[in-house]
Image (cartoon, rainbow, N blue to C red):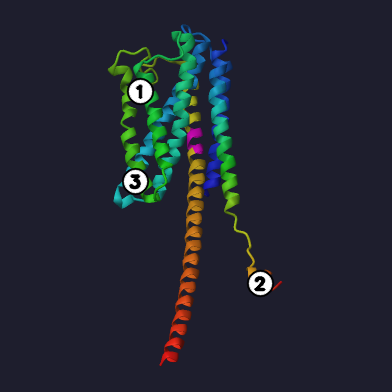
Amino acid sequence: MNGYVEAGYAVALGTLGAYSLWLLQRSVKLKRALIPIKVTDDEEANPKGQ
Amino acid sequence: MRMPVVRTIIGVLSLVSVIVTVILGLFITPPDVVQGNLARLLYVHPPVAWVAYLAYGVTSLASGLYLWKPTRSMRWDQIAASSAEVGVVFTALTLVTGSIWGRPAWGVWWTWDARLTTTAILLVLYLGYLALRRVQVSREKRAKRSAIAALIAFIDVPIVHESVNWWRTLHQGATVASIGTNSKIHGIMAWTLLLGFIAFTLVYVWMVILRYEVTVTEDAIEALNISAWTLERENEIGSLSDEIAGLLSDNKDRTGTSSSKVR
């Protein structure tokens, strides 16, 4: 082949692959950000004067 | 079936079909009589261009459904945004793969040909659409403005498609559309091209589902941040009004005492 064909395939697959990875990474990060965590009341955890 | 399961199935199918398309396109199909090996790029370029059209079609449909009051829902706005972003990626790829093909075929990376120019305008229009979505306004206002912008931008899609018929261009006319009637491609080359169309359409569907999920989560986080901010301000206002009420009652007590002393 002449190099142009390989370059075309590489650009197409590389761009789609990079965009897919970015989307997957963002999806995982955002899902983690929304995981509910147990929050203890300040008063309960740290009584007055302690 | 749950959405992540559907997304995973489509993801696997798209990956397999893209791999098969690449193997067929690069190694199995014969070189073209006229273009030689360069024709192998055409198993990627037209399918990618088709997906760009499809993406903007979906964006326009979803935008129309958002603007139409009986079907108005933020879900349509989120689908429109997701599809437009994926469409922009595919439009950029259309231009780049076309340019890589054009250099050896036409002798130039770029020419102000009608098809190329209208496609570049299409990319700029939808980049503008995505920029418009970043403007900090209420979600409803953003959705309405974006939906109108998407419908206006879509006017360029039929112009891009018909540009090769309306103007004398360097870009070739429709070849793929004639499959089945007066096909100019045949055998394994036609099947590979068809598989390319299916593969990249599956990739598009997978990407839009994933982008939609991300958009929904982003909007939820944005709403949470806003409600946390509002709560904070409300608490501040609450403590301030308590303070003012306390000061006022202190002042009242003092005035009452002094006035009784005067009496």
> Dot 2, how many residues are within 10 Å of its Cα: few (below 14), some (14-19), or many (20+)?
few
Report the amino acid beneath label 2. Answer: Glu
The residue at the point 46 percent across, 73 percent down is B244
Say which mark, if any, is on residue B144.
3
The residue at the point 50 percent across, 66 percent down is B235
- Does the image show residue B12? no
Q: Are marks 2 and 1 on the same chain?
A: no
| Quadrant where the image shows the C terminus of chain A | bottom right
Tell me if label 3 and label 1 are in contact, CB under 8 Å: no
Say which mark, if any, is on residue A44.
2
Q: Is B52 located above or below residue B141 in the figure?
A: above
The subunit letter for the residue under badge 3 reads B
Q: Is residue B168 within the magenta segment?
A: no
Based on the displayed image, in which of its 4 quarters is residue A20 positioned?
A: top right
First along the sequence among labels 3 and 1: 1
Give x and y (percent) for residue B114. 34, 18
Give x and y (percent) for residue B153. 34, 33
- Image depth: mark 2 or mark 1 in front: 2
- Magenta part of the chain: B202-207
In this orientation, which residue lies closer to the viewer: B252 or B131? B252
Q: Is B93 located above or below residue B140 in the figure?
A: above
Report the amino acid beneath label 1. Answer: Thr
In this orientation, which residue lies closer to the viewer: B248 or B107? B248
Say which mark, if any, is on residue B118.
1
